[in-house]
Amino acid sequence: MSLKTLELGLKAIRVLQDGTDPPEEALLVPGWYIDPQTGQRIFYDPDSQKFYTLAGGVYIPLGYMNPAPKQVAVAPGDRLKVTISFKYTGPAITGVTGYYCLGVNGIFGFDEKLVQRTTFNLPQVTTPPSVPNVSDSYTFTIPTGIGTNWDDIYVKIFGGSPSIAGEATTPYLFGYENALTIAGIEPNITEFKIADFAKV
Amino acid sequence: MALDIVLAPMALEPKTFNVGEKVRVTVSFKYVVGVNTTVKLLAGPYSTNLFGKHLVSSCVGQAEIQLPASSTLADGAGTVDFILIAKPLGGIDNGTYGLRVWIEDTNAVAEQDNVLIISGNTSGGDMFTSMMPMLMMVMMMGMIMPMTQQMGEGVEEE
C-alpha cells in the first residue's frame, strides 16, 4: 500500500501570554467580507475576534471545518500522512501537542474515530514570518475496519510550556470535510445504472 | 459563440415479454472497496399505483458479483436474470411494469417506470374471478328464496 499525504494550513497563531494579535487579523475592521476560497459572505466581529455567517436571521460562528481542496483515496493498510503548517511568532515553546483526528463531522460535532497525538517544539521567532515557519505531521495506518464515512479530518494544537492554549479551548484547530475517499470493507458504489435488459 | 451539447443518458425503451420468459438485466457502475468483496445483485418488475411502487417479489432474480479491491474508482458491471412467473402460479399479471435493479446492503438502486410490457396470461382465470360475485349472489338467492316461501306458507295457514 502506498503513502498518501494530506496537508493542512493552520494559518497564524500566537501564544496566550504574547498579547499581540496576528498581523492578518489586526487589519480587520468589523463588517462583511467575502471568503476568497468559498465566495461565502461572512461577518467579522473584532470583539469576539470571530467570523460569522448569517442564517435565518441568526449570526452563527464560522466553523473550523472547511471544504477539502482535494480528496485522497485510502484503503485498509494504506498509510495517510497528515501535515500541518502555520506561521508562528513568539517565544520558544516545548512540548506542544498536535492532535490529529479522522472521523465523521455532523451537526452535533465531530465524531472522532481515529485519534493520534504528536509532540513538537516551537522555536523562538521575533519577526513575523511571511511564510509558514512551523510544520508537524502524523502518519495514520488505515485500519481494516474503517467506515466509508470516516472521510473528515481535523487537527488542533495545544499545551506546551509555556502553554499556547488548553486542550478543550484551543482556537488553533482546522479541518477539512470530505477530504478522504474511503475504500472500506463495505463497497461504495456510484453511477449505478441499467445498461440493458432483454429476453434470453 | 460556443455551442454546448450535453448528451443525456438514453432512457430504456419499453419491451414486451410473455409470462414464463427469462429477462436478463445488465448494469454498470463505479465503486471503491478496500478488500475483495462479493455483492448480491437483484432485479425485478414493479407496479405503480396511488400508494406507491410495489415490487413483484415472486419474479425477483438475484446474482453475485465479484468486486476486486480498489481504492480508486473502478468500473464494475454485472448481469442478473429473473423469470416472469405467470399470474396463476402466484406471479405477475398482464400489464405494464417498471424495472428495478439494486445491490443488496448498499445504496445502489436503479429503476425505470413502464419498460416491461407483460402479456401471455390466459384469460380463463380472470373470467372465473370476475364471475365469482355473480355466482355468489345466485347461490345466496337460491338459499333465501326457499326460506321466504316457507315463511309465506306459514302465514297463510293462520
Image (spheres, coloured by chain):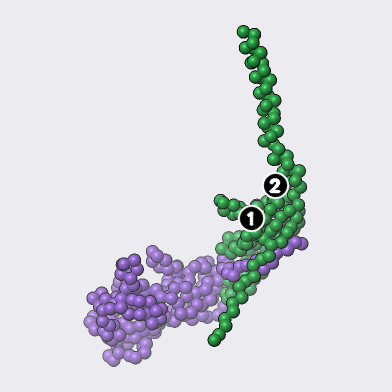
Chain colours: A purple, B green
| Rendered residue at 67%/55% (across/down) | B96
Q: Position of residue A98 (x, y in %)?
A: 38, 77
SS state under label 1:
strand
Instruction: Name the quadrant containing residue A37.
Output: bottom left
The amino acid at mark 1 is Tyr
* Chain where mark 1 sits: B
| Rendered residue at 69%/36% (across/down) | B132
- Please report contact status of discs 2 and 1: CB closer than 8 Å, yes or no: no
Q: Tell me the crowding category of disc 1: few under 14, some 14 to 19, or many 20 or more residues within 10 angstroms, Cα based.
A: many
Cα separation, mark 2 vs mark 1, equals 15 Å
SS state under label 2:
loop
User: Visible in this render: residue A181?
Assistant: yes
Seen from the viewer's position, the closer of residues A35 and A176 is A35
Relative to residue B8, is residue B130 depicted above or below? above
Q: Position of residue A65 (x, y in %)?
A: 39, 73
Instruction: Name the quadrant containing residue A153.
Output: bottom left
In this image, B99 relative to A111: left or right? right
Q: Which residue is mark 1?
A: B46
Q: Which residue is mark 2?
A: B90
- Quarter of the image for the C terminus of chain A: give it: bottom right
The amino acid at mark 2 is Gly
